[in-house]
Image: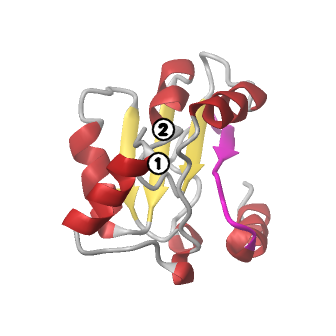
Amino acid sequence: MFTSSQLSLFLRENSTRPRKSLGQNFLIDNNIKGKIIEHCEILKEDTVLEIGPGLGALTEGLCAKAKFVYAVEKDKLFARTLKENLKSLKNLEIINQDILKFPLPVKPSPLNIKLKVIGNLPYCITSPILTYLIENRR
């Protein structure tokens, strides 16, 4: 997880800033990160769909608890950075796509996998995402 100064440096070095249109926000508090992951009640057999992992503040912690994590990130720079920084995690697939255009279920499965959906989302995009997930809950 990036600290505040690491995040500022990363954004500056990549000539970017949080994009309001994507509702980008960044978790930099380890205490809050721990509480979020704890409240998700992830079991070792769980498959997780993380929406908008950004720069991976929750991703590594989710991978430590879950069987597998699919992280769907719309921002190309962030998806590429996640792939570079978390390439050692064998139970993670990073997908560079808009979650609202992402085909659910994640993988066709005769077992009809249930997903735990997790994301540190801003309010401005929560309703469309929840509607999409409900409409595609098969």
Depth order, front residue of 74/105: 74
Depth order, front residue of 36/118: 36
The amino acid type, in three-letter code, at marker 2 is Thr
For label 1, the SS is strand
In percent of width and height, residue 61 lies at 52, 27
Say which residue label 2 marks.
59
In percent of width and height, residue 11 lies at 31, 64
Query: Could you say which quadrant of the image residue 104 lies in?
Result: bottom right
The amino acid type, in three-letter code, at marker 1 is Ala
Say which residue label 1 marks.
71
Q: Which residue is drawn at 72% across and 62% down?
A: 133
Q: What stretch is highlighted in magenta?
A: 110-123
Q: Is residue 136 left or right of residue 61?
A: right
In percent of width and height, residue 81 lies at 27, 52
- In magenta segment, residue 115: yes
* Quadrant placement of the C terminus: bottom right
* Quadrant placement of the N terminus: top left
Q: Nearer the viewer, mark 1 or mark 2?
A: 2
